[in-house]
Structure formats: structure tokens, C-alpha cells
Image (cartoon, rainbow, N blue to C red):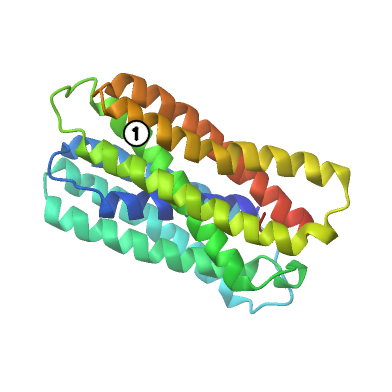
Amino acid sequence: MLALAQFAVRLICGMSLVLTAMPRAAVASGFFRVQMLIVMGLGVLAVLADQTAPLNSEISSWMPQVHWGLSLVLAVLGFIASVFWTLERRKGAANLLLLIALISMLALGLGIVLAQPKQWQTHWGLIFASDFSSALTLGGAMCGMLLGHSYLTSPTMSISPLFRLNEFLGWAGVARGVISAIVLCLAWSHLQDESVWTWLVLRWIAGVFGPIMVWQMVQRILAFRNTQAATGVLFVGVILTLLGELTGTLLLTATGYPL
């Protein structure tokens, strides 16, 4: 179940990166505490999935153990960061957030190496770029939707953080689309299975066009400061990005291309 562990690490990476980059001063610490608990849960999921992953004889035996250890560290750091946010130790919590982002990027790269590279039909750098843009898309959608719910209890809070998270989602979606288009051009002559094309259509509608459409809709809604409607649209965005990225994972496994 390495793919499941890698998906959890990808979501941790995206969430930690967008939370690090967003303006945090106007947002209550309780929001970040919840995000860190989600990171802890995803880290535990990655640890459990790593334990059931089959060993690949083509790679060194220590590499899966390192990936498992990094997942465990992410889970522990998520819990510690949640305690820091609870205690209003914002500076220390922000440092932990940056550390989580760096470790998750390392785990993301290591997971790519573990995923049977002989099956890849393109350069590993393109696969890492695909996973990285996927992480930012997932993180932008998830954190944006959860931040939108905070306006139910804090309606006077500045919309600048939500606007910034929506921008992250939009530009990550554009990058995701560019990378997918490049890979599709490279793989066009090799995609002959009709079932692959069915999944590919779903992947593009949900995972490429979906985030960009959500970005534009939320941007227009926030111009009227309607945070509740924006949150509803972002909730749809979370569903679309999850569906699109999971479909992308299936296509990578089936074809060797990060479509």
C-alpha cells in the first residue's frame, strides 16, 4: 500500500506548505491546531500503509524503513505542533510547520524512488514535479475549505488568508494542468486501452479543470465577501481534487505516466 502512504504524505506536504506561506496573523490558533491534528492522522495512515507495502528487491532494504521513519516523524511532529498551537506558542509552532513541510518533501521524493521506477515511462523529475503540484493542489483545496468554516464563528476575520489559499489552489491547478498536458503529449501514442481513456477523462475533469474552475468561482464570490458560499464551492473543490489525484495515482500505476 505504498501508493496510499505516498498519497497521505503528498497531502501533508501540500497542507504544510500552504499553511507556511499563508498570512497567519489574522487567523486564530485553533484553526492551525486542527490542521496539525489532521497532519498527525495522515502521518499515522502513512505509517500503517508503509507496514503493509510489499518490499521491492530492486532497491536497498533500508529505504522503506527510512520512509516509514519519516512518516512516523511527521505524525509525531503534527501532534507536537498541535500542542504548540493550543498553548499559543505561535513562533515555535510556525517553525515546526516549516520542519513538517521539509520532511514531507523528503518523504515525497523517497516515496517516488520506492515506487518501482522500472515501470516509469518518463523521467523521474517529471514525476516529482507532478507529485509536488498535486500536493499543492490538495493542500490548497483542503486548507481553504477548512479555513472557510472558521468564518462561521469569526465572521469579522479578514478574508485575506482565504483569498491567499484560493490563489494557491488556482496556480497549483494551473501548474498541475501544464505538467499533465506535457505528459499527455509524450504518452499519446502509447495510450491505446479504452479503459485508460475513460479514467483519463475523469482525471482531467476532476483533477485539472476542477481546481481551476473552483479557483475562479471562489475569487468572484470573495469579491462580495460571501465566505459561506466560497466555503461551499471549496468543499466541492476538495472532492474534485481528491477524486482527480486518486485517479492520477491509478493512471501512473497502470501506464507509468503521471497523467
Q: Residue at x 39, y 53 (%)?
A: 75
Instruction: Out of 40 and 128, give the one closest to the viewer.
Output: 128
Vertical order, 79 against 95 (above or below):
above
Q: Position of residue 245 (x, y in %)?
A: 59, 45
- Residue at image location 66% in from the left, 42% down from the top: 203
Residue 112 visible in the shown view: yes
Decide if residue 133 is on the left or right side of residue 85: right
Q: Is residue 159 above or below residue 72?
A: above
Can residue 12 be seen from the camera position used here? no
Circle 1 residues within 10 Å: few <14, some 14–19, many ≥20: some
Q: Is residue 53 left or right of residue 150?
A: right
Q: Quadrant of residue 198?
A: top right
The residue at 66%/58% (across/down) is 258
Q: What percent of the width, then of the height, locates residue 103?
A: 39, 65
Q: Is residue 100 left or right of residue 196?
A: left
| Front residue (pair 106, 24) | 24
191 relative to 56 in the view: left or right: right
Closest to the observer: 29 or 26?
26
Q: Quadrant of the C terminus?
A: bottom right
Give coordinates of residue 175: x percent, y percent: 49, 55
What residue is pinned by disc 1? 219
Residue name at image x 33 percent, y 25 percent:
221
Q: Position of residue 62 (x, y in %)?
A: 57, 76
